[in-house]
Image (cartoon, rainbow, N blue to C red):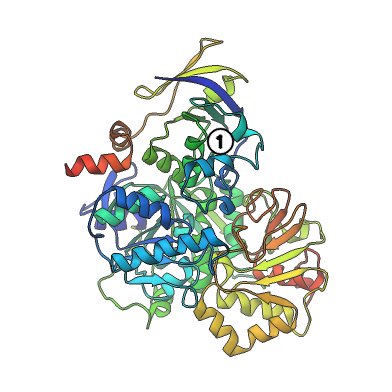
Amino acid sequence: MGMTLTEKILANKSGNSSVKPGDIIFAQVDLSMATDIASPITIQVFEELNRDKVFDPNKIALVNDHLTPAKDIAAAGFSKMMREFAKKYGIKHYYEVGRSGISHVILPDDGLVAPGDIIVGADSHSTTYGAFGCFGTGMGATDIACVWAEGEVWLRVPETIKIEFKGKLPKYVIGKDLVLIVCRDLGMEGGTYKALEYCGETVENMTMEDRLTLTNMAIEAGAKNGVIKADDTTMKYLEGRLQRDDYQIFESDDDAEYHSVLEYDISDLEPQVALPFLPSNVKPISEVEPRKVDQVMIGSCTNGRYSDFELVAEVLGDKKFSKDIRTIISPATTEIYNKMIKSGLSLKFSEAGAAITTPGCGACIGAHLGVMGDKEVGVFTTNRNFPGRTGSRTAEVYLTNPAVAAATAITGRITDPRKLD
Amino acid sequence: MLRGKIHKYDVDNIDTDRIIPARHCITVDPEKLAAHCLEDLDPEFASKVKEGEILVVGENFGCGSSRENAPIAIKGAGISAVVAKSFARIFYRNSINIGLPIFESPEAVNEIKKDDIVSLDITTGKIMIESSKKEFNSAPFPQMMQDIIAAGGMVNYLKNKHS
């Protein structure tokens, strides 16, 4: 019997010729990541283990992204703890504010993610990395601390759900809209303990940025990982970034066994919206009431890449953002931020009335840089809209792609970008 | 054997943001985390829970973020175990790792009533409701997880492995 892409990666990294769903394996870890909000507990657990060194200081990344620049004294203390740990153990990939960004965007952009790798992060959106044909999954502090000590992790081999897209992406429909319909159909736990493997002609023709959104939100269906086989698009993206050649490209065998298969023709798909309070509560934009909003937030590990802001600029044209609302733009990394300055996008957005923040996760997690107040309504390009996620538990958040968010920011109401053309 | 009064919230998809919002996660102190545990679901929760009581919840409990603060906050609030219709994957793993016993049984959750006293057997996964005398079996843990539970959590498991 053949193996799926995920099974092949796990077999290779655990020294097995083959694995099957349900097997418990110990796999070598190529990169282990923790953020400023997760690393303090991870560091505490690591210290309980009484090790004098980490398994490999070149295979750990510590990223200031959730609370940076320090939002308060406690956050400054968290960041300090991570900074001192990085120094003490010689952690090579430590990201300080000013050179940092959202982990899931900055690590691949810095060449730390390669096809065939096993990447575990103390953040649930570590599924994102799978867009590069590797295995990426989120774990808690204790698991990550044990990886820092041992360099390996135990995993139960997941069954794979194959998700096949065909058709050409319509205007203002991007990866976000595709993953939202997957969340709608699988529900919040349809992917639990499973791998989501995205494939089909639409995925093959997709940009890396769009693919990254597909794997990013695999966790919203409860999945263990999201994965897309590496191809020319992948390698072209990594060109000049990836500094190593010991990676391996795998693909699913024709006779691989899947848990189930979902097939979509997206030729006529509309932009999609996840209504409060679940990422699976998804409707096409034409069925969503044009509610007045208080804040639009464009950014996050889901949709804070340069291409997302190009899309915003396309919708914006010569218009301005509404004076009645707050428009917040968060580039995902310093590199993207600088590119926006150089290309003039930052000035364009700022002159249109948007606030541009330091790269990071702030508003998405309701920590800072755009927290939602009581009974406010928001349109976010992020990944979660649970009660209290972005601030007040009575705030209502709609999740959309950046084109819908931009159109909404222009009119002040939830708006279909196709109607502004 | 664990025995305690239950707190039941038959709500599905109680995510980690509702268990402990990110804004309250900037501490490593379990007591400070516990003070805000489940406050967006029930603002009274932290003040009414007594040591050793049992949390009973719906499907996909602990979905969302990977924050280990979530099971730490629940344990810190005094909860001795969680019985759910089902758990999200990362929360499940985190709970085992920090030594918070968890039991999965939709049937048990449906049968458990307000103010019930429930007994839980960690080794067999048996769930017993005192008032109705009904018994249920939790889905069994994979062997690897049983070994971690037997060691009292992942840290001890690793320490034992190297001793």
Q: Is residue A2 visible?
A: no
Above or below, A66 relative to A50? below
Residue sitting at the far front = A73
Q: Is residue A26 left or right of residue A108?
A: left
Disc 1 is placed on an element classified as loop
Using the image as rendered, state which of residue A413 and residue A169 is in the foreground. Answer: A413
Locate the C terminus of chain B by quadrant: top left
Judging from the image, mark 1 belongs to the subunit labelled B
Q: Nearer the viewer, residue B134 or A415?
A: B134
Can residue A45 be seen here?
yes
Instruction: Decide: is A402 above or below A186.
Output: below
Residue underneath mark 1: B59
Name the one closer to the observer, B37 or B123.
B37
Using residue A277 as the reference point, say whether residue A128 is left or right of it: left
Measuring from the top left, give residue A85's x and y in whole percent.
35, 63
- Residue A119 position by quadrant: bottom left
For badge 1, the amino acid type reads: Glu
Q: Position of residue A293 (x, y in %)?
A: 79, 62
Rendered residue at 33%/41% (across/down): A22
- Would residue A371 be found to the left or right of residue A200 on screen? right
Residue B59 position in % (x across, y down): 56, 36
Residue A143, image x, y percentages:
35, 49
User: Dividing the image into 4 quarters, which one contains the N terminus of chain B?
Assistant: top left
Q: Nearer the viewer, residue A13 or A377?
A: A377
Other-residue count near label 1 (Cα within 10 Å), few / some / many at <14 / 14–19 / ≥20: many
Residue in view at x 50 percent, y 80 percent: A335
Q: Residue at x 58, y 68 (%)?
A: A303
